[in-house]
Image: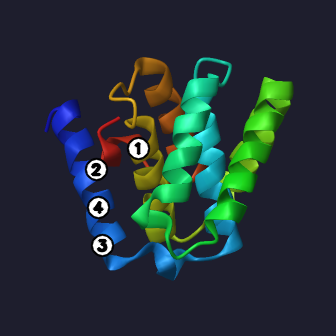
Amino acid sequence: MGFLNKLKQMAQDGQKIAQEGYDRFNNAAFADATMAACALIGAADGKIDQQERTRTAQFITSSDKLKSFDVGKLRDKYDAYCDKISRDFDFGKIELMQAIGKIKKPEEARAVVQLAVVIANADGDFDAKEQAVMREIIHALSLTPAEFGL
């Protein structure tokens, strides 16, 4: 399966999980890992573009996929992670990867990746830098990039 087909399949899988409800993952570790992954994807080029940050925050607060969560808390967590990685990219990245690495259940880990892919693809461009960060996220979750076509 080609990369674009795999990306489409991941988005469809994410939609399926969303239809089933992310509420079964409604816990602090999952919320932290998802927001950390979103911030890392946004900072894939070493900085977070304000437009991308705003677009991601809007997705977080308006997404049906995240409706079972307190979206205000999710947005606050996302903003805090963006601030950390903006202040000091290297140390911020370490802290965010640690938050991601706390997810141990494979089903939750896959859901983190699927949500991160949806966010990464929100601008219609899942570029090489974002793909590289996604591979790091996948490794931190003890999954294999090949599973996601990366």
Element type where label 4 sits in the image = helix
Q: CA distance from mark 3 to mark 4?
A: 6 Å
- Residue of label 2: 11
Which residue is more in the foreground, 35 or 133? 35
Q: Position of residue 134 (x, y in %)?
A: 49, 37
- Name which of mark 2 and mark 3 comes first in the sequence: 2
Looking at the rendered structure, which numbered label has been put on residue 15? 4
Look at discs 1 and 3 and give the one toward the viewer.
3
Look at discs 2 and 3 and give the one toward the viewer.
3
Q: Mark 1 is on which residue type?
A: Val
Decide: marks 2, 4 in contact (CB < 8 A)? Answer: yes
Q: Mark 2 is on which residue type?
A: Ala
Q: Mark 4 is on which residue type?
A: Gln
Q: CA distance from mark 2 to mark 1?
A: 7 Å
Q: Position of residue 106 (x, y in %)?
A: 47, 67
- Residue of label 3: 19
- Residue of label 1: 117
Q: Mark 3 is on which residue type?
A: Gln
Q: CA distance from mark 4 to mark 1?
A: 11 Å
